[in-house]
Amino acid sequence: MDISTISNEYGEQNFTNLINAGIVNVNTAEAVTDADTMANAKQFLDNTFPLAKGFHKEVRSYLVYYQQLLMFFADGTHTGLKHSGQFVALNGHKSEPEAILLNSNGTHVELSFDRGGKTGIKDQAHIDDVRLEGHEYWISLLNIEEKRIIENSQSAQIFTAKDGSEYSLKG
């Protein structure tokens, strides 16, 4: 996949965010595969979904309280997103979500959590994957060693919107 393909399919702003976060190397248009992949993904989250205070790399847990996404830090303090409307849906229980769905300018980003997962077991917030929505597929920002696009296996992914209604992503 060359830079023009990435730029056209993800939109110029999202592509710029991937470059700024170190996810995409502009010289080779390949994903970075070093040990800083999680740090790069969290930098992408900070650039695209900034917190009202603090940074995603400092977050110990994510939960939904009423219709707000809250992030808790090691000292027990908490914050929300700078732009609270970017949180749109979740999977799982509000106090321990399996996935959080965020939206920036029409593009969805899914944070999936798994305490026992390959990546989640190492992360203090148990983030197992960060996936960026493409056109009819998702791209993993953490499982880069696979170097493959995650195809939607179903015709639609179903989440629970923050108001409790069904939130469907068409595949």
Image (cartoon, rainbow, N blue to C red):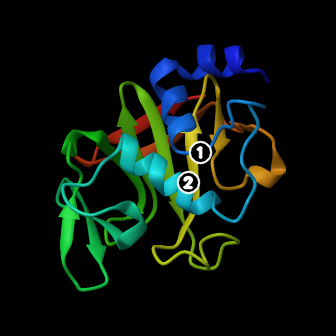
Percent x, y for residue 105? 36, 25
Q: Which mark is residue 40?
A: 2
Can see residue 134? yes
Q: Which mark is residue 4?
A: none
Which residue corresponds to mark 1?
A: 22
Q: Earlier in the sequence, mark 2 or mark 1?
A: 1
Determine whether, in the image, residue 86 is placed left or right of residue 116.
left
Instruction: Choose top left, top right, bottom left or bottom right for residue 61.
Output: bottom left
Q: Residue at x 32, y 42 (%)?
A: 88
Hey, which residue is sitting farthest front in the picture?
27
Say how many tags the image has. Answer: 2
Q: Residue at x 39, y 25 (%)?
A: 106
Can see residue 96? no
Instruction: Choose top left, top right, bottom left or bottom right for residue 145.
Output: bottom right
Q: Residue at x 74, y 30 (%)?
A: 27
Depth order, front residue of 133/23: 23
Q: In the image, is residue 108 above or below residue 2? A: below
Instruction: Choose top left, top right, bottom left or bottom right for residue 28.
Output: top right
Determine whether, in the image, residue 54 is placed left or right of residue 61.
left
Hey, which residue is sitting farthest bottom in the picture?
75
Cα distance in 3D space between marks 2 and 1: 6 Å
The quarter of the image holding the C terminus is: top right
Label 1 neighbourhood size at 10 Å, few (<14), some (14-19), many (20+)?
Answer: some
